[in-house]
Image (cartoon, rainbow, N blue to C red):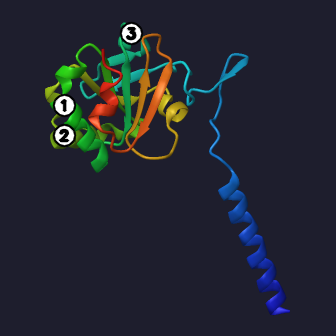
Amino acid sequence: MKKILAGAGLLCASAFVIQAQQQKAQPVPQQTGEAKVSYREEGSVLPPLRVIDGKMNEYTEKSFRNDHHFFMFLFNPTCGHCIDMAKLMGAHADEFKKNHVLFLAGPAMMPYLGHFFQASGIDKHPEIKVGIDSASAVDRLYNYRMLPQVNIYDKDRKLVKIFYGDVPLDSLKKYVP
């Protein structure tokens, strides 16, 4: 009887694991009025933003409008890969000067921004904005793969490309005028 119960339990656990592996991560649609909108697929529009930086300045999606691509880095201020990416972007900030660049962290990350600035030196580049999300944009955008997640939007603020993790600078430069 014990062998039968153990075997049945093992069979159920195996079926659960197989089912979980077969399910793809589906974009979570966000409710906006009557229509559902997904912000995680190429061609999607930029969601509403409300970004608060370390000096309590506020930026919205309108703050990042121009005729060039917009680079949004979803990051964690304590993540080594994110710090390295910020160092890289800071070292090449002049190459992205016509574009808007934003490093956006989750709402609970404000206490860690000081460490991020110190470790990355990104605060020496005021043209690169760094802040926390105050409009649930990260929840709408993050694909739960790897940090940093780099979303690139065209001049109309439609998503054209997503990169994950350590992104070579040459890959990003393809989107610079």
For disc 3, the neighbor class at 10 Å (few under 14, some 14 to 19, many from 20) is some
Against 38, residue 9 (above or below) is below
Image disc number at residue 65: 3
Image quadrant holding the N terminus, namely bottom right
Q: Earlier in the sequence, mark 3 or mark 2?
A: 3
**Residue labelled with disc 2:** 120
Asked where in the image residue 97 lies, by quadrant, the reply is: top left
- Name which residue lies at 24% across and 36% down: 86
**How far, Cα to Cα, is label 3 from label 2?**
26 Å
**Residue labelled with disc 1:** 90
For disc 2, the neighbor class at 10 Å (few under 14, some 14 to 19, many from 20) is many
Q: Residue furthest top?
A: 67
Q: Residue 39 in the image: x percent, y percent? A: 56, 26
Asked where in the image residue 58 lies, by quadrant, the reply is: top left
- Name which residue lies at 50% across and 37% down: 142
**How far, Cα to Cα, is label 2 from label 1?**
8 Å
